[in-house]
Image (cartoon, grey):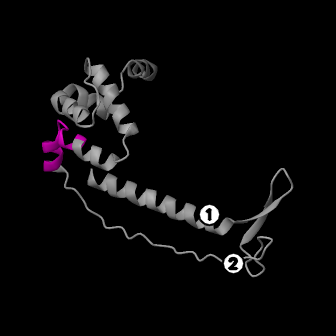
Amino acid sequence: MASRNRRKNNNRTDITLMTLLANEATDGSRKILKEYGEPDAKDYKDLEVKLAELYFKTTDKVELEKKLSNIHPHKKWLMKYIEPVEKIVEVEKIVTAETKSNADGECPTCSLQTKTSSFSGESKMQSSSTLGIIGIVAVVGILSLSLIHIAKK
């Protein structure tokens, strides 16, 4: 019995947000394409693909997501039963100070730098802690923005 249900589920097609918008909010989707200077779609499938391509190539995804959510066919129902939650997330600003080095590029007072060498045998100083801090801040920032975006949905 379970294998038969599994076979039935394998024949289902995935319905994405872009599929829903292309099929149920066609006029609004076409207006958004036109607004972003994209060519008009030939059919529903082409509209779905063009919406996805627009999303992936746009730089301001938040603005596009707002426009897409305004044309969503279930917007009124969602807003009626799901109250949006706004969260204020504080972003910590980290300032790093540059240290002066001597002519060799080595800082005798800084223990956070590591030496690296290239194929030609030249050695360079590289601050691994600064890169680590920047990486952590980037991950925390992306996670915070994702949580804000999810909470707004």
Q: 27 and 121: which one is in front?
A: 121
Query: Magenta stretch?
Result: 68-80
Instruction: Give SS at disc 2.
Output: loop
How far separated are the C-alphas under marks 2 and 1? Answer: 18 Å
Q: Is-magenta flag for residue 72?
A: yes
Quadrant of the image occupied by residue 143: bottom left
Quick check: can you spot residue 54? yes
How many residues crowd mark 1 within 10 Å: few (<14), some (14–19), many (20+)?
few
Residue 107 vertical position relative to residue 77 in the rendered view, above or below = below
Q: Specify the label residue 100 is tagged with.
A: 2
Q: 77 and 45: which one is in front?
A: 45
**Residue drawn at x 58%, y 67% as measured from the top left:** 133
In the picture of the structure, the residue carrying the numbered disc 1 is 131
**Three-letter amino acid code of the residue under disc 2:** Lys
Q: Earlier in the sequence, mark 2 or mark 1?
A: 2
Residue at the farthest front position: 103
For the N terminus, the image quarter is top left
Percent x, y of residue 134: 56, 64
Quadrant of the image occupied by residue 31: top left
**Residue drawn at x 83%, y 58% as measured from the top left:** 122
Q: 49 and 83: which one is in front?
A: 49
Percent x, y of residue 113: 73, 70
Horizontal side, residue 27 vs residue 136: left or right: left
